[in-house]
């Protein structure tokens, strides 16, 4: 006898039933969607915003928007992917808004009306930690978070969606409201910046591993 | 081939390089590019391991609590209110009794309407007591079966939240199974009273499955969960629920005459 196994198809079918019922006026059915997808959306939101407070707001807003736009979803196949994209869109808007506010607070005389995003790599503190400290558990994680927060909102969104979310270029382009080639470039630029900021630490680990292998 | 650019190696890592085969062959022969690719792989692997705080197993429930008051009502069918609009958390809560009372009131209203309409010379089909009673039951049971189906599908999907966790938490499904259990008893009894033995039979089987879920531990080992899935599958309850649900939908869409209703009932009972 075949055992009943969880599958993407079953999840999607169950999601489709819940969407249909929500549209028919059954609000409790939407609860199932919220309970099922919240944690995954939270992971995306946390990686994009870098803190729990903002991540929780993104999750909440994503589901509110999904509920409001649910009729537009009817023809789509995957609720999880859809709400994920809504969260990414909201997170990027929020990050941009916050960066503009922060920049204006720090430099009241300077505006960003040209629409370009300030390269925050220069803002990363360059006090390099000692190798001893780096060797301590968690130090690399601190450096990675710092490097991620130095990316522009578009780069961070592109990187998170591509690397952690497994989203395709078209999906990323849609979230960034850009062309596919621009989205591809943004993914590349994000990896390039992360390499520049983190490779000294990762290289050190690779070298240590190589030495262990030789020994 | 000349050395691929950094951009091409990153695209290759993501499986998006336009010349995938050429780069693979080049990397195999070129120690310099192989080293470069290893560094990209190592960096991205390190980033993959970057932890995200776990918001907790009840995170979804907390999100729901926060957003539920902000959700506007969607204009659905009125009968959703019967079984879903005010679904309570527990059978003994006042809302539960209110919902049950609402169903009973509607059935009673349908009965009274039927009594009065039967005195007319040419009774309208809508006012026919049998039809209205059956229609109310069909709609409410249809909703009930739909929600039961969702619980069963979710159980089929339940798995540990992370590979490190050895148990699966099914408390959410259990809570809903307990609610459904009480409704199920009411509908099964009504179906029996109406002489709809086929529907009553399916509801009886559903009741056993819901009991099984409601009385299980909240935290299940994978073996216990598999056992539960097998019991559900052995009964074929998901399939039966879907078939009956579809049939109820069909019946709901075409309001039958009393004669047609009897004929449908007797055919299904024979089957």
Image: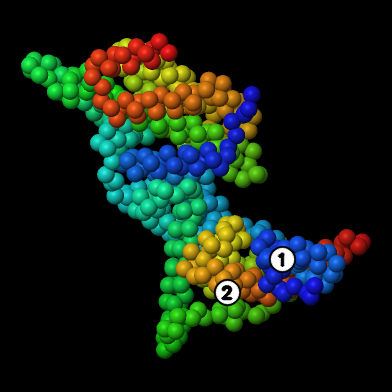
Mark 2, residues whose alpha carbon is within 10 Å: few (<14), some, or many (≥20)?
A: many
Q: Position of residue A129 (x, y in %)?
A: 70, 75
- From this view, report whether residue B142 is shown above or below residue B198: below
- Residue lying at the far bottom in this picture: please name it: A109
Task: Kindly state the secondary structure of the residue where label 1 is placed.
Answer: loop
> The C terminus of chain B lies in which quarter of the figure?
top left
In the image: residue B269, left or right of residue A193: left
In the image: residue B139, left or right of residue A74: left
- Determine the image quadrant of residue B145: top left
Please say if the residues under marks 1 and 2 sit with CB atoms less than 8 Å apart: no
- From this view, report whether residue A74 is shown above or below residue A94: above
- Determine the image quadrant of residue B252: top left
In the image: residue B148, left or right of residue B8: left
Instruction: Indicate which label's residue lies in the foreground, 1 or 2.
Output: 1
The residue that mark 2 highlights is A150
Q: Position of residue B9 (x, y in %)?
A: 72, 68
**Residue B156 visible to the viewer:** yes
In the image: residue B51, left or right of residue A95: right
Chain of the residue that carries numbered disc 1 in the rendered image? B
Q: Position of residue B5 (x, y in %)?
A: 72, 74
């Amino acid at each position: 006898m075949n055992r009943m196994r969880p599958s993407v198809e079953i999840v999607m079918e169950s999601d489709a039933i819940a969407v249909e019922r929500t549209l028919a006026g059954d609000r409790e059915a939407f609860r199932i969607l919220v309970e099922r997808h919240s944690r995954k959306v939270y992971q995306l939101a946390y990686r994009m915003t870098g803190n729990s407070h903002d991540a929780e707001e993104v999750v909440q807003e994503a589901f509110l928007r999904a509920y409001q736009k649910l009729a537009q979803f009817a023809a789509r196949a995957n609720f999880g992917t859809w709400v994920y994209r809504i969260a990414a869109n909201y997170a990027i808007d929020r990050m941009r808004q916050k960066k503009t506010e922060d920049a204006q607070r720090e430099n009241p005389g300077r505006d960003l009306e040209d629409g370009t995003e300030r390269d925050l790599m220069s803002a990363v503190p360059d006090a390099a930690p000692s190798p001893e400290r780096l060797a301590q558990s968690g130090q690399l994680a601190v450096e990675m978070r710092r490097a991620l927060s130095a990316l522009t909102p578009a780069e961070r969104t592109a990187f998170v969606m591509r690397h952690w979310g497994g989203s395709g270029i078209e999906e990323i382009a849609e979230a960034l409201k850009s062309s596919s080639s621009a989205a591809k470039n943004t993914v590349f630029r994000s990896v390039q910046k992360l390499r520049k900021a983190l490779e000294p630490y990762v290289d050190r680990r690779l070298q240590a591993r190589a030495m262990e292998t030789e020994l | 081939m000349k050395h691929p650019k950094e951009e091409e190696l990153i695209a290759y890592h993501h499986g998006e390089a336009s010349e995938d085969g050429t780069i693979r062959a080049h990397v195999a022969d070129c120690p310099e590019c192989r080293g470069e690719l290893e560094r990209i792989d190592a960096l991205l692997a390190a980033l993959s391991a970057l932890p995200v705080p776990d918001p907790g197993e009840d995170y979804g429930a907390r999100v729901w609590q926060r957003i539920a008051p902000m959700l506007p009502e969607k204009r659905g069918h009125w009968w959703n209110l019967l079984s879903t609009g005010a679904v309570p958390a527990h059978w003994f809560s006042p809302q539960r009794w209110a919902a049950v009372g609402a169903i009973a009131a509607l059935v009673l209203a349908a009965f009274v309407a039927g009594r009065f309409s039967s005195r007319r010379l040419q009774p309208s089909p809508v006012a026919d007591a049998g039809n209205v009673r059956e229609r109310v039951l069909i709609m409410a049971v249809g909703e009930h079966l739909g929600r039961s189906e969702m619980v069963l599908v979710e159980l089929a999907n339940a798995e540990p939240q992370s590979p490190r966790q050895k148990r699966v938490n099914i408390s959410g499904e259990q809570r809903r199974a307990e609610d459904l259990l009480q409704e199920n008893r009411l509908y099964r009894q009504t179906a029996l009273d109406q002489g709809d033995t086929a529907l009553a039979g399916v509801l009886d089987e559903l009741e056993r499955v819901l009991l099984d879920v409601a009385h299980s531990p909240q935290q299940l080992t994978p073996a216990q969960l598999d056992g539960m899935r097998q019991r559900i599958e052995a009964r074929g309850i998901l399939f039966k629920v879907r078939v009956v649900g579809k049939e109820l939908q069909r019946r709901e869409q075409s309001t039958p005459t009393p004669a047609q209703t009897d004929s449908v009932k007797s055919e299904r009972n024979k089957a």
